[in-house]
Image (spheres, helix red, strand yellow):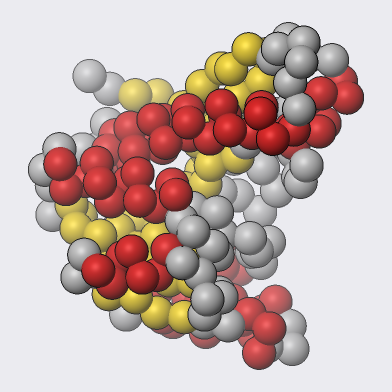
Amino acid sequence: MKKIVILISGRGSNMRAIVDACMSQKWPAQIAAVISNKADASGLAYAAGLGIDTAVVVSKEFSSREAFDCVLQQTIDEYSPDLVVLAGFMRILTPAFVEHYAGRLLNIHPSLLPSFTGLATHRQALDAGVKVHGATVHFVTAELDHGPIVAQAVVPVKADDTEDSLALRVLEQEHVIYPQAVRLFVEDKINITGHIVKVSE
């Protein structure tokens, strides 16, 4: 039974998708805790309502990223997780933190990496005039948005798309591929060779 800790900063819609899939599909896993860097993150109430442990480590209370990450790591490690999942966790993590969870830290990014890293990905896609956009689940490394790719979903870009309309369709696909990727990890079907993820049957 693998233990999963999920980090959020807001409503946690991807967290909800993962929790729901874990429960409904009866994964050999437990969502051990949901942790936020914001006390008013609405996703915390959702998790608590399902009996999942929640915790808050308020990022604004720390003078440096290193100090915050140190306490966050201590809080996570109380649950001895096999996997840490970033689900709308709006923090850039320090290299030491990332290294501590190497090979067991997943993120989802709203673009088809390696294109459009960083913020405002939907605006970047529209400005570039691409015909397809999407989302990527990847392992986190010290280089922002560049870790080994586990799964991707492609969304067509429509002529009348706005950032909001495109973001909504991408988010729908995030809710599909993120639980799928986490399940692959839970079932020991992911192997990383260099920078390449291979999925076993």
- Residue 187 appears left or right of 97: left
Percent position of residue 90, x then y: 63, 60
Q: x and y percent of residue 172 in the render?
A: 48, 31
> Is residue 154 toward the left or the right of residue 114 in the image?
left
| Between 36 and 85, the one nearer to me in the picture | 36
Residue at (25, 69) in percent of width and height = 49
Residue under the point 69% across and 14% down? 157
**Residue 68 sits in quarter:** bottom right
Residue 85 in sight here = no
Measured as percent of width and height from the top left, residue 107 is found at: 52, 47
Residue 81 vs residue 178, the one in the foreground: 178
Quadrant where the N terminus lies? bottom left
Q: Quadrant of residue 66?
A: bottom right
Name the residue located 58 percent from the left edge and 82 percent from the top edge: 58
Foreground residue among 86 and 140: 86
Residue 159 shows in the view = yes
Q: Position of residue 185 (x, y in %)?
A: 30, 40
Up the image or down, 140 lies above or below 72; here it is: above
